[in-house]
């Protein structure tokens, strides 16, 4: 399978009586930060938590993109935090590791005053989503995920609860129709 780094995984809806991937991934949109033969990891972009960033990372709250909440990036290592940033331009910046395009990870141990002047958007995630070698490829073959291109603003959507629908709706294929499926597709 091709390298999917920088692409979105959009959860395929399934009827309530059909086994799925669990509540964490129901109608989720995952940005793949890394993908190779050894596995993949990414962040669920549309799971805001009912917690301010300052509750876990004092000093970062004033800098996070709206809605200004901590997000759950996935079920793995919920006691860790990742800062996803949008970086304009091609320059390298101390405290930021560019992953692809304008997307990077920020060193959350660095003082915000050092890195924030170079950042256009910031979102903080508790945990991440991870797959072992061939696990993600198997899930895609089994029909659990749609794989679609990401757009620059997806990771920093002001309406994360509507991201699943928005990403599907903009597809130029029959996937756009999936955006209208009810929560339980068997009711369609």
Image (spheres, rainbow, N blue to C red):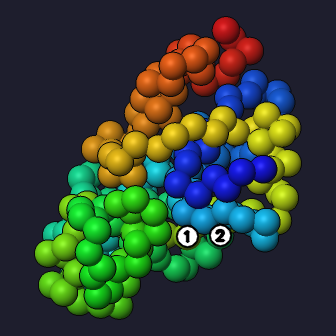
**Residue at point 67% right, 22% down?**
184
Frontmost residue, 156 versus 20 = 156
As drawn, 43 above or below 23 = below
Residue 187, position as x, y percentages in the image: 69, 11
Q: Do the residues labelled 2 and 1 touch (CB within 8 Å)?
A: yes
**Residue at point 55% right, 48% down?**
7
User: In the figure, is residue 11 to the left or right of 7?
Assistant: right
Task: Tally the numbered discs.
Answer: 2
Which disc number belongs to residue 127?
Answer: 1
Identify the mark nearer the N-term, 2 or 1.
2
Q: Could you classify mark 1 by the number of other residues whose Cα lies within 10 Å: few (under 14), some (14-19), or many (20 or more)? A: many
Frontmost residue, 58 versus 3 = 3
In which quarter of the view is residue 145 placed? top right
As drawn, 184 above or below 4 = above
* Residue at mark 2: 76
User: In the figure, is residue 168 to the left or right of 41?
Assistant: left
From this viewpoint, which residue is outermost toward the front?
A: 90
Disc 2, SS:
strand
Which disc number belongs to residue 148?
Answer: none
Residue 8, position as x, y percentages in the image: 55, 45
From this viewpoint, which residue is outermost toward the top?
A: 188
User: In the figure, is residue 9 to the left or right of 165?
Assistant: right
**Residue at point 33% right, 66% down?**
85
């Amino acid at each position: 399978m091709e390298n999917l780094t920088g692409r979105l995984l959009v959860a395929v809806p399934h009827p309530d009586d059909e086994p799925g991937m669990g509540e964490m991934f129901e109608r989720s949109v995952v940005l793949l930060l890394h993908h190779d033969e050894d596995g993949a990891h990414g962040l669920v972009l549309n799971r805001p938590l009912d917690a301010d960033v300052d509750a876990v990372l004092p000093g970062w709250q004033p800098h996070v993109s709206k809605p200004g909440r901590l997000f759950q990036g996935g079920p793995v290592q919920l006691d860790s935090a990742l800062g996803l940033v949008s970086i304009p331009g091609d320059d390298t910046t101390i405290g930021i590791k560019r992953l692809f395009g304008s997307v990077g990870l920020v060193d959350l141990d660095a003082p915000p005053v050092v890195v924030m002047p170079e950042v256009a958007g910031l979102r903080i995630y508790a945990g991440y989503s991870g797959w072992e070698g061939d696990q993600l490829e198997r899930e895609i073959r089994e029909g659990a995920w749609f794989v679609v291109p990401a757009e620059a603003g997806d990771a920093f959507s002001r309406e994360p609860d509507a991201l699943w629908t928005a990403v599907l709706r903009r597809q130029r294929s029959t996937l756009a129709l999936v955006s209208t499926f009810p929560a339980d597709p068997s009711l369609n």
